[in-house]
Image (tube, rainbow, N blue to C red):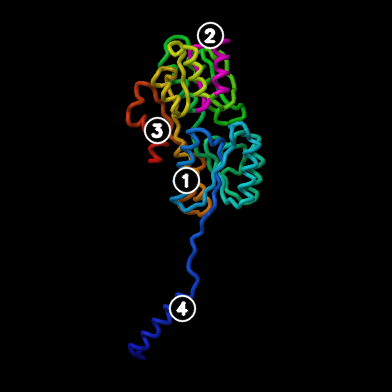
Amino acid sequence: MKRSKGALAALLAAALLAGCGSTPAVSVQHSVALVAKSTQTEFWLSVFAGARAAAAEYNLKLTVTGPETEEDYVAQNAMVEQAVTDGAEALVFSAIDFTNNASTIDAAAAAGVKVVAIDSNVDSDAVSAYIGTDNHAAGRMAAEAALDRVEGELRVGIVNYDVSSANGQGREQGAVERFAESGRVQVVQVINTLAEAQHAQADTTALLQQHPEINVLLAFNEPTSVGAAEAVRQMGLSDTVFLVGFDSNVATIDGLQEGAVDALIVQNPYAMGYLGVESAYQLLTGQGGTPEDVRDTATRIVDRDNMFTMDSQKALFAFEQRSN
């Protein structure tokens, strides 16, 4: 049966009205909490920049917290518990203490929170993905930087941070392993200091005074590298002690130019933050595929010979470039 144009118009109007009365689709904004080891260094500022970029791209509500020092795992555990109480659906986490953070992460997972580890892992089966440096390989890279650039016998001092931090221990193991393979290295002493530049400087100064035979220093994160570089500079040892540090910082870059630092192992903290939040999004929504169990972010050696190349400048000043 044919309908008149008037009847068709009436049907169309009714359909439009029915559509207007239906409930529209709502885009859910998921909540992600990033709990870092610290908020005080350029390394972590770069992590946060990457995390916020991913949160904006994927329409996530992101909170960022961290303790004042990289030794305070108790405060870090309290921050995780608060994030769960506040309704976080996923946690992007860098553990201060591989063991002592584990039970809090287990409890968060038991409450239904998805867990992604970045930078430094935790002893928990609840971690769905780890994103960061291959720390054992990075330690070997630091040792290789010294072996390739210093002739003769190496007498090495290692300045590490908290003995309970998984990434620092991985770097130490990798470096010591590579040194042992070389057959021309004596590791004189390994010290563990607070991940604060002032403490690292004092402890490095004491190490060098006690062992004047040391001609190579390795420092395994940003604060220890800044402190070790200042110790070398103030003691006037830039020409006799070869320092390999970690991460990009104004002080260590200045040290690289002036001679107190000889090589830097530069990580990619921006990628850690970005990929950590992206992985949380994938776990919460199932979109974009399942995140890989382990994702290794890029690491490179920067020294005075290559520091002004485009690739090295991008690595050294990643946070400044991403912020512009």
In magenta segment, residue 247: no
At label 1, the amino acid type is Arg
Residue that mark 1 sits on: 52
Q: Are marks 4 and 2 in contact (CB under 8 Å)?
A: no
Task: Tell me if residue 20 comes above or below residue 194 in the rendering.
Answer: below
Q: Tell me the mark number nearer the camera, choosing from 3 and 4.
A: 3
In magenta segment, residue 206: yes
Say if residue 305 shows up in the picture.
yes
Q: In terms of sequence position, does the residue under pointer 4 or pointer 2 come before the other?
A: 4
* Residue 271: percent from left, percent from top: 45, 39
Residue that mark 3 sits on: 317
Task: Tell me if residue 305 comes above or below residue 134 in the rendering.
Answer: above
Left or right: residue 306 versus residue 53 is: left
Q: In terms of sequence position, does the residue under pointer 3 or pointer 2 come before the other?
A: 2
Q: Secondary structure at mark 1?
A: helix
Q: Which residues are magenta?
A: 198-223
Give the label on residue 212, or none.
2
CA gap, disc 1 and disc 3: 18 Å
Q: Are marks 1 and 2 in contact (CB under 8 Å)?
A: no
Give the label on residue 18, or none.
4
* Residue 91: percent from left, percent from top: 57, 46
